[in-house]
Amino acid sequence: MYNHNNRMKKKLQLTVVVAFSLLFAAKAQDASHEKPRSEISLEGMVGVSFGNNFYALNVGGPALFLVLNPDLKIGIGALPSIYLLNGKAGARLGVSPRIDYKNLVFIAPFYHRDTTGEWIWSVGMGYKFHKKN
């Protein structure tokens, strides 16, 4: 009887050791298969605006905001832009009031033409990219 109980005890111990070994091996294997997160991301704003015979692709530059809540900000900012005016392309820095709501940006950029002294107005929308943590 003593021999039978001793054998059962050893089988139980062996079963527990094997079970824990498999459990820890599976955990270690899961950790090694985790995909590393990419450090590459976009951060900033890109938008489009339209005016009278005027189209622009804008990116967010420096801005000053009044933060009303985590989702809503109002402010004014500089918008480096590539534009098309009367069929001619160019690059110009625009200034715009802006309203940021979550990831959407509502803009009304205006640009000064040095050669004619006129101001070009436009309105548009953009999207904000946030770095993922």
Image: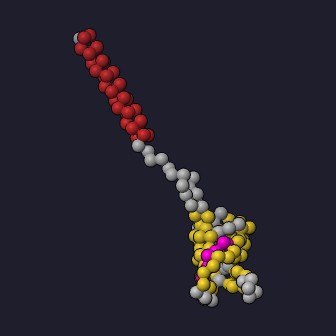
Main SS, magenta region, reads strand
Residue 62 or 115: which is nearer the viewer?
115
Residue 112, compared with residue 64, is above or below; it is below
The image quadrant of residue 22 is: top left
- Judge whether residue 46 can be spotted in this image: yes
Residue placed furthest toward the right: 117
Q: Residue at point 68% right, 67% down?
A: 61
On whether residue 38 falls in the magenta region, the answer is: no
Instruction: Give x and y (percent) for residue 39.
Output: 54, 52
Instruction: Give x and y (percent) for residue 10.
Output: 30, 18
- Judge whether residue 125 can be spotted in this image: no
Image quarter hosting the N terminus = top left
Residue 34, compared with residue 42, is above or below; it is above
Residue 21, compared with residue 34, is above or below; it is above
Residue 64 or 22: which is nearer the viewer?
64
Left or right: 70 in relation to 118: left
Number of labels in the image equals: 0
Colour theme: secondary structure
The image quadrant of residue 100 is: bottom right
Instruction: Give x and y (percent) for residue 30.
Output: 40, 41
The image quadrant of residue 98 is: bottom right
Q: Residue at point 62% right, 70% down?
A: 59
Q: Residue at point 67% right, 79% down?
A: 108
Instruction: Give x and y (percent) for residue 46.
Output: 59, 70
Magenta residues, start to end: 79-84
On whether residue 82 falls in the magenta region, the answer is: yes
